Image (spheres, grey):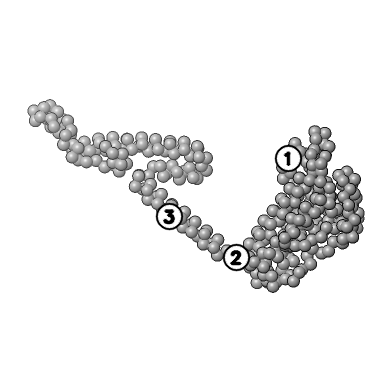
Amino acid sequence: MHISSLLNDSFDDSLLSDSPINSSPPNSPRGTPSELDLSSDDVLATSNLTTHTRKRQLDEDLTQYAESLSRKLHFKPLVEKEFKKFAQLSLERQIVWLAGHVLSVSENIHSVASADSTQYQIPAVLGNRLERYVFAAIVSSTVSSYVKNNELVNQVVEFLAQHPHWGLSPEVKSDKAKMDVIYSRIRARLTIRRYEIKTLLKDSIGVVDDEGNISGAQNILELGEAIINLGNRICDIKLSIQFLARVAVLIHQQRSIYVERAEQDPQTKDFWKTVDQQLDEIRGVKKTPEAISQLFTKVLECDRNKFGRANLNQVTATVETNVFEADE
């Protein structure tokens, strides 16, 4: 008997025609109504009882298997409950259930694809300006934080909004969906720039021996030029003493992490957060821009004494200009 007949509680009356009960000879005791009077209804009831018993056993087996598979696949309780219900369905119902869910997933994918195709596209002019001033912001020597409070993100947006003809018009700024796209692009580009700079800082450290001594370190001028060159195709920023002093503070922090915490934190995932904390501490002690500048200059001088006194004569004469000066 096929398993589907068990699931559907079906039974063919013709199967009774060859049964031992109906084929007994007329004079046989088994065929004598007075001794054994079994109507066809009685036989069907007995057969249906057997069918129900087998179906119940099959349902229990499938439920146990579904429960075991749910644990193996780490289903959540609600998903496991639905999966057990599915396991108890007939084959036909399972096929319909699967078809319905496949169509539902297909429809959802189509909806997501349609939403992506209609998403706001940043105009080319605005995208180019955004890229330029993201880099200008992150290499500025006056940055007060690199990741904290989204300072750099807001700084770039504010500057772009001052030049609406680039594409960030008041209409765009008042449209949340469009601004979400712009904010997302700025954050992504800042993340990439921070990674590039941190990689240069790490590579400039040189070799650190078991006692924490450093050899083969890159001097501060070479490191500063390497960082500036990251943006040489999109903006023209000149080296300045202020910028090199900021780089000296960054590399000092990077060396401290790699030398003192190399075993505990080899990836230095919190590097920029640590830098922001250090800048907060500096501002807490040095209350004026002049005092902060003097401290940074001392850090620069210490770096030069320890890792190479690069010739800064040409750089000395360079005064840092406002990196957010618009080139119309």
Label 1: how many Cα within 10 Å (few below 14, some 14–19, many 20+): few
Return the residue nearer the eye: 115 or 230: 230
Residue 238 location in percent, x, y? 81, 60
Instruction: Report which quarter residue 39 is drawn in.
Output: top left
Return the residue nearer the eye: 143 or 218: 218
Q: Tag 2, which secondary structure?
A: loop
Gap between marks 3 and 2 measured at Cα: 28 Å
Residue 178 location in percent, x, y? 63, 65
Q: Amino acid at mark 1?
A: Pro
Gap between marks 1 and 3 measured at Cα: 48 Å
Q: Tag 1, which secondary structure?
A: loop
Question: Which is in the foreground here, disc 1 or disc 3?
Answer: 1
Q: Is residue 163 visible?
A: yes
Q: Which residue is identified by label 1? A: 266
Determine which of the numbered discs, if any, sits on residue 138 in the image: none
Above or below, comparing residue 232 to residue 270 in the picture:
below
Lower position in the chain sequence, tag 1 or tag 2 = 2
Determine which of the numbered discs, if any, sits on residue 103 in the image: 3
Above or below, comparing residue 188 to residue 74 in the picture:
below
Q: Which residue is identified by label 2? A: 120
Q: Amino acid at mark 2?
A: Tyr
Lower position in the chain sequence, tag 1 or tag 3 = 3
Question: Which is in the foreground here, disc 3 or disc 2?
Answer: 2
Residue 28 location in percent, x, y? 11, 27
